[in-house]
Amino acid sequence: MKIIETAIPEVLLIEPKVFGDQRGFFLETWNRDRYIDAGFPDVTFVQDNHSRSSKGVLRGLHFQLNHPQGKLVQVATGAVFDVAVDVRVGSPTFGKWVGYELTEENHRQLWVPPGFAHGFCVLSDIADFTYKCTDFYRPDDEGGVLWNDPDIGVAWPVKSPNLSTKDQIYSILSDIPEEKLPVCFP
C-alpha cells in the first residue's frame, strides 16, 4: 500500500496493494494496523455508507459542524471525481481543495479528515461509492458549501450536474458565518 500526501497535507490519497490474476482481484480496503504502519491517522470508524448514483450526479459539498466526520472513501463500481475542501476555521489551508478521480480500476481511496467539506460527481454511467466514517451522520448537524463557489474554484468535470435541492441552495463559503463552520482540529 502506498499513502500519498496531497497539496493539503491532512488529505491522503491511498493506493492499496491489489492482488490480481485471470480470476479477478483481491485487496484490503481497511486494515487498521497496516494503514497506521503506513502513516494513516489512528482513527476509529463507526459507520459505513454505500451510495449509488448515475452519470452527472454531483453530491456535495457537505460537512458536519459539531460532529465532524472523517471519511475514507472509494469507488466499488464506476468512476467519480472526488473533492475535499478545507472549511476549518483557523486552518492554514482554509478554502483550498483537492480532487482525484477514484475508479473501480485504480482502486484508490481518499482520506477526507474531520472538518472538511466533501463531494463527488459521477463520471461513469453508474457509480457505487462506499465510505467509512469516524462519526455518525446527524442530519441536524449537516452543513454545506455551494458546489460551484467561485472563490474555491473546484474544477468539476461536469458543467450542468444533477443536484439535490439542498446542494443547489447552499451558500458560498465566504457567506457562511464562522460559528457555522468547523474549527481547526489539531
Image (cartoon, grey):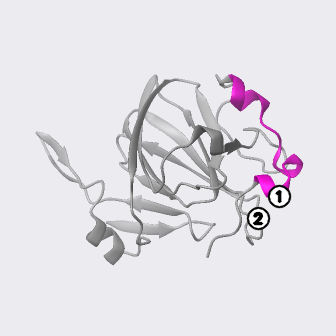
> Which disc, if any, is residue 143?
none
Q: Which residue shows up at 63% across the image and 59% down it? A: 115
Q: Where 151 falls versus 157 (above or below)? A: below
Asked whether disc 2 touches disc 1, contact meaning CB atoms under 8 Å apart, the reply is yes
> Which range is magenta?
165-180
Specify the principal SS of the magenta part: helix
Q: Which residue is mark 2?
A: 89
Residue 19: x %, y % from top left: 18, 54
Return the residue at label 1.
Answer: 178
Residue furthest to the left: 23
Asked if residue 88 lies left or right of residue 64, the reply is right
Q: CA distance from mark 2 to mark 1?
A: 7 Å
Name the foreground residue: 94 vs 65. Answer: 65
Quarter of the image where one finds residue 130: top left
Q: Is residue 92 magenta?
A: no
Q: Amino acid at mark 2?
A: Val
Measuring 36% from the left and 40% from the top, which residue is drawn there? 104
Quadrant into which the C terminus falls: bottom right
Question: Image check: 144 left or right of 64?
Answer: right
Q: Secondary structure at mark 2?
A: loop
